[in-house]
């Protein structure tokens, strides 16, 4: 079945530590890939996206993500986390063609401790 | 342009009442999406419009739900005879197809059915 998996429901990191959030997808073709961030009670903000080309993409707020076709993964990283990064992060895919909608993973909630 | 706006931000209603939400997309965007997000979950696709045409509806959209986009600009989502299970955040997003698959989200309408 087609799916987007974020295996980590909740992650806690110390401020200043590095961060990696995992995302795997299960589709026949390479989809368009996105990472969104959602603060409590707010809508979603796009952090970065991958359509094609360079597999390491840079986003806003110092985030980056790497597409690995062999692993069907699109993991989000940040070298040094700030307290303001505490939020929920969603990986999402867009297939295009006849599937004109973005499908989201279940999210990873990030807690940042001082 | 201030982005995608949704109204109201919060709605509390009694079970059995009807509610209507409004979404104003980014002005030049031809595609408009509705999603529902329950606590601890990622957004789930409900329906989308290409201009004024409703092109896809999820099985989540029961016959109590109806969405319209009469002039291809703003959209409304109506829920009739609300049930407690309808309590969720309802998110609207818009995009410019086919050039840009990136969806921009509004801040959502939080519905509480009591």
Image (cartoon, helix red, strand yellow):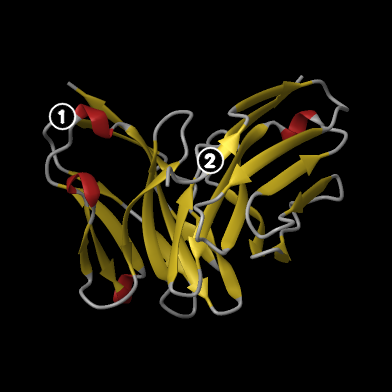
Q: Is residue A1 left or right of residue A31?
A: right
Mark 2 crowdedness (10 Å alpha carbons): few <14, some 14-19, many ≥20: many
Residue at left 53%, top 36%? B40
**Residue visible at 55% across and 37% down in the picture:** B108
Report how far apart the C-alphas of labels 2 and 1 lie in the structure: 33 Å
The residue at which mark 2 appears reads as: B5
Q: Which residue is mark 1?
A: A15
Figure label count: 2
Per the image, label 2 sits on a secondary structure element best described as strand
Front position in the image: B22 or A112: B22
A55 in relation to B45, above or below? below
The x, y position of residue B87, in whole percent, is 69, 31
Q: Nearer the viewer, mark 2 or mark 1?
A: 2
Taking the image as shown, residue B68 lies to the left or right of residue A37, namely right
Mark number for residue A53?
A: none
Chain to which the residue tagged by mark 1 belongs: A
Under tag 1, what secondary structure? loop
Residue at 22% over, 63% down: A57
Residue A5 picture quarter: bottom left
Picture quadrant of residue A13: top left
Q: Residue A14, percent across and down?
A: 17, 29
Q: Position of residue A103 (x, y in %)?
A: 53, 59
Residue B32 visible in image: yes
Q: Is residue A104 left or right of residue B114?
A: left
């Amino acid at each position: 079945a087609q799916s987007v998996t974020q295996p980590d429901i909740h992650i806690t990191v110390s401020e200043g530590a590095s961060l990696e959030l995992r995302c795997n997808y299960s589709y026949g073709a390479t989809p368009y890939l996105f990472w969104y961030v959602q603060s409590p009670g707010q809508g979603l903000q796009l952090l970065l996206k991958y359509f094609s080309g360079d597999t390491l993409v840079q986003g806003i707020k110092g985030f980056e993500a790497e597409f690995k076709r062999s692993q069907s993964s699109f993991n989000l990283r940040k070298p040094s986390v700030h307290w303001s990064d505490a939020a929920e992060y969603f990986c999402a895919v867009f297939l295009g063609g006849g599937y004109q909608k973005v499908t989201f993973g279940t999210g990873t909630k990030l807690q940042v401790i001082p | 342009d201030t982005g995608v706006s949704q109204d109201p931000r919060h709605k509390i209603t009694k079970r059995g009442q009807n509610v209507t939400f409004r979404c104003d997309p980014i002005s030049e965007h031809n595609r408009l999406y509705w999603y529902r997000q329950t606590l601890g979950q990622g957004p789930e696709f409900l329906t989308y419009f290409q201009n004024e045409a409703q092109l896809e509806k999820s099985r989540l959209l029961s016959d109590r739900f109806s969405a319209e986009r009469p002039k291809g600009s703003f959209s409304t989502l109506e829920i009739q005879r609300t049930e407690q299970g309808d309590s969720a955040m309802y998110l609207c997003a818009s995009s410019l197809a086919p050039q840009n698959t990136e969806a921009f989200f509004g801040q959502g309408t939080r519905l509480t059915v009591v």
